[in-house]
Amino acid sequence: MTPLLALLLIITLGLALGKVSFRGISVGTSSILFVALLAGHLGIVIPEGLGTLGLALFVYCIGIAAGPTFFRGLASNARIMATLGAVMVLTGIVVTWLCAKLFDLPADIAAGLMAGAMTSTPALGAASESVVKPDNVAVAFGVAYPFGIATIVLFVQLMMKRVAVSTIGSETESPPEPRLDDDRKIQRHVVEIANPGVAGKRPSEVAVSSDLSCQISRVFLDQRWRPTPSDYVFSLGDRVMLVGQQEEGRRGAETLGVLCDIQDVVLDTDRERKEVVVTSQEIFGHTLKELRLRSRFGVTVTRIRRIDQEFVPSAHTRIEFGDTLSLVGEPGDLLRLQKVAGHRPRTLNETDLLSLAFGLTVGILVGQMAILWGGVSVSLGTAGGPLCVGLVLGHFRRIGFVAGSFPPAAQILMTEGGLALFLADAGIHAGADVWSILQQQGPVLCVAATAIAVLPLAVGYLMASYCFGLTRLESLGATCGGMTSTPGLAALTSSTDSSEPVTSYIAAYPVALVLITIAAPLLIKLL
């Protein structure tokens, strides 16, 4: 069998194994490592060098994806979740260090255990890059990874069962709460202006547009619902159309006046409503308040669709590349804004290979730069350099001619493809030693992996619940993010319709992902 054919066969079998699910939970791409370990044990070889390329591509795309939310999470209300993720990573480092000292584990084994128990393949890559012989890292990761997945999934299922028991026990004490799906649904609300405090003010000067996720899309003028003019000011008795979720709309109506019970509203949606895809630098990267679209164009952004989520923006919402904006305005104004916004849907499917190659090159060069720290030469390596460059580019979206974003499908392909190459390479090289390591230290590795998985999880959940006062669903979502555990989130979302777990997971995940990737080489230095 040729090395190239062996590589493709390992990836194919690994991906097929990864699709096998048990109670809705599957291992995914990481199954390639287990197939590669077996292949390496049997003496099969694959082409050299592809693992390094795969690692660089994988972590670079991770940085690009995490960039827009990573720095913003540190400087916004998401900092609670970000802090929680950081605490869980720090706990994982401390527990791993203690296990290494207690069981006399080598640094490479300890780093692999931490990466596996916290289900972090980027940490596996960073640790492998930081040791002379990365084989032991992959073996330890392979031992710890199942423990990491099982621990977080069982914990989530146990806590959700407690929620269910509590709900059943309290059914006679309180009426059932309304479905969250209805509360999250975007609706139109007709409001009559009755608050003297808003009379004479523009919509942008009232808290409805600036603080709430609501938009005033239309005003009833001249016996028809017209798009809100650029020079419109509130007058007592006016009727306006408020777009927002049920709770946000109710709060907005209280601010403006009274909610009207009007069922039949005739709108000219064919001519006065348009969906525009943002591809222009003049628009993305700015908030609605900075863009002043209503005063400049007479157009209101009523909804934003980002990937697979649709929401109503506030004045502080920042537009991102590829957002689909639902606009309401006069036909001529809509066309003017469309030209400024770019509106080239094809751009979303074009991958800038020059930016990809340049970003990877700069990332690898940054990773090779050595810094003297405490008398020790430290470098970011092939994992850390591309990750940092990807984070910066992902945050700014574009620096000069270098794009910091890729089409979603292309980004997923590069991320998963790079990970597949790296895992296949790591498993093949570690396969020769896997049996001897398991014979010598198998039980110890299992005990250490369990401790590294359980303790950060417990600390994170207790801190989220009792120190930060988060709800149970928010706490579970944040702990899944702090453990960088997508299977854990899958188990959680399959048990509830609430969006709370996903929101807290997204806030905690990028910080934990970046920190554990940096922490793996640091742990090796400490040991």
Image: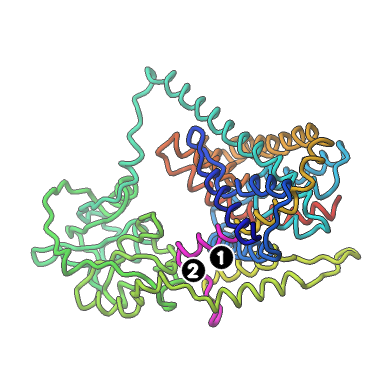
Write the residue at 45% across / 62% down: 409
Chain-order first, disc 2 or disc 1: 1
For the residues bearing labels 2 and 1, Cβ distance under 8 angstroms: yes
Q: Is residue 512 above or below residue 117?
A: below
Report the disc number at residue 406. 2
426 left or right, relative to 282: right
Q: Residue at x 13, y 48 (%)?
A: 263
**Circle 1: is it few (<14), some (14-19), or many (20+) Cα within 10 Å?**
many
Residue 253, compared with residue 468, is above or below; it is: below
- Of helix, strand and loop, which one carries label 1? helix
Residue 461 visible to an observer of this rendering? yes
Provide the residue span drawn in magenta: 399-418
- Residue farthest toward the right in the current orientation of the protein: 375
Residue receiving disc 1: 64
Above or below, 416 relative to 293: above
Q: Position of residue 191 (x, y in %)?
A: 22, 53
Q: Secondary structure at mark 2?
A: loop
